[in-house]
Amino acid sequence: MSVAWLRGNALTLLENGAEFFPALQAAIDGAATEVFLETYIFAADDTGRGIAAALRRAAGRGVTVRLMVDGFGGREFVATLLDELVAGGVNVLIYRRELAAFSLRRHRLRRLHRKLAVIDGRIAFVGGINIISDFDGPGLVAPRHDYSVRVEGPLLGPIHSTVAHVWEVVAWASFRRRLHLTAGPPACAAACGDVEAGFLIRDNIRHRRDIEDAYLVAIAAARREVILANAYFLPGWRFRQALLGAARRGVRVTLLTQGWTDHPLQQRATRALYGQLLAGGVRIFEYHLSHLHAKVAVVDERWATVGSSNIDPFSLLLAREANVFVRDTAFAEDLRRRLDRAIADGGREISADAWERGPRLQRLINWLAFGAVRLMIGLAGYGGRH
């Protein structure tokens, strides 16, 4: 499915929780009729409790508040915040709460990884930022690096539709018919700005490859520059060939990945691909200032995307994801400037020569990690699809 571009939107790029959480809380505090919020993680820290308090305030003044949290990412939420939010009038659903033990069966690995909010059908937030402090994690002295987009305008239509649809599906699947949607405000259809944008999801039915295909189309059309910042980067053959093909055409291809990681197996698997990418002309930087959690890209300072989808098999084959895509010079240049600053402040470049001179044992460990991740995907029933 190609991107359905809609004109007339007003988009605000938000960097890190310092910009995102105040904007989200202000929108919730201004809600008059309805709040939807979907998140993978909802922590019981100061940040999470602040958003939880805003949700309770909204419910207390008669706003219909619907919160959906993933059953795996939100395990702490179930044990800490769930009961008080329900007691405060918030309607809460847990996505696949049945996860009780580790399993590689594909239905157990299908998570709600989207980070979406829709307020009164007139304001939405789309991005990669969970409801958790930017400084959650041992030793962090700089904030976790991530982005979200505040959206107004016709793009509210598809965003509102998808959160309402998933709410309906999960409510019925969990026999929570009392939480079934009865009515909701129509999504905003009026032009609020002049930005052209689209919205795509990834699911396991009709939209399996929509986000990946949108990336591939943009990379294939690139003429000057491709910049990708991705927390968990483990692309399949098609994606790697697209990047290498762009580099062969003379396009400047830059990749920003995690240097400081919470998933060392995936980081090692990513590094197994460095040799091929570096030899093909791709510049690679690892971000060491803090955790890189972004899932964003800019192409030719005209096309951009911000969302929840990593370029790895877990996002591209298993999880529910959502990205906003933008064709607007001002927005793309804003995101590019922020990425340039992130690279300058926290990026360490990996040179092709230094990589080739590196310890062979480390390269062997990387390839063993790559094989382990591929095995996990194969056991989940998705071997050969990535």
Image (spheres, grey):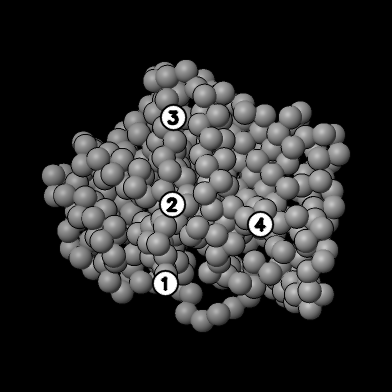
Determine the residue positioned at 42% across, 70% down.
139
Residue 12, label in figure: none
What's the residue type where badge 3 is placed?
Leu
Quarter holding the C terminus is bottom right
The picture quadrant where one finds residue 50 is bottom left
Q: Position of residue 256 (x, y in %)?
A: 63, 50
Q: Distance between the residues labelled 1 and 4?
A: 23 Å
**Residue on which the image places disc 3:** 11
Q: Position of residue 368 (x, y in %)?
A: 77, 76
The mark that comes first in sequence, 2 or 4, is 2
Q: Distance between the residues labelled 3 and 1?
A: 34 Å
**Residue on which the image places disc 2:** 129
What's the residue type where badge 4 is placed?
Phe
The mark that comes first in sequence, 3 or 1, is 3
The mark that comes first in sequence, 3 or 2, is 3
**Residue on which the image places disc 1:** 138
Q: Position of residue 149 (x, y in %)?
A: 44, 38
**Residue on which the image places disc 4:** 233
Q: Distance between the residues labelled 2 and 4?
A: 17 Å
Q: Can residue 158 be seen in this view?
A: yes
Q: Distance between the residues labelled 4 and 3?
A: 26 Å
The mark that comes first in sequence, 1 or 4, is 1
| SS under mark 3 | strand
What's the residue type where badge 1 is placed?
Pro
Q: Where is residue 18 in the image (x, y as percent from the top left)?
A: 34, 47
Q: Callout 4: few (<14), some (14-19), or many (20+) C-alpha neighbours within 10 Å?
A: many
| SS under mark 1 | loop
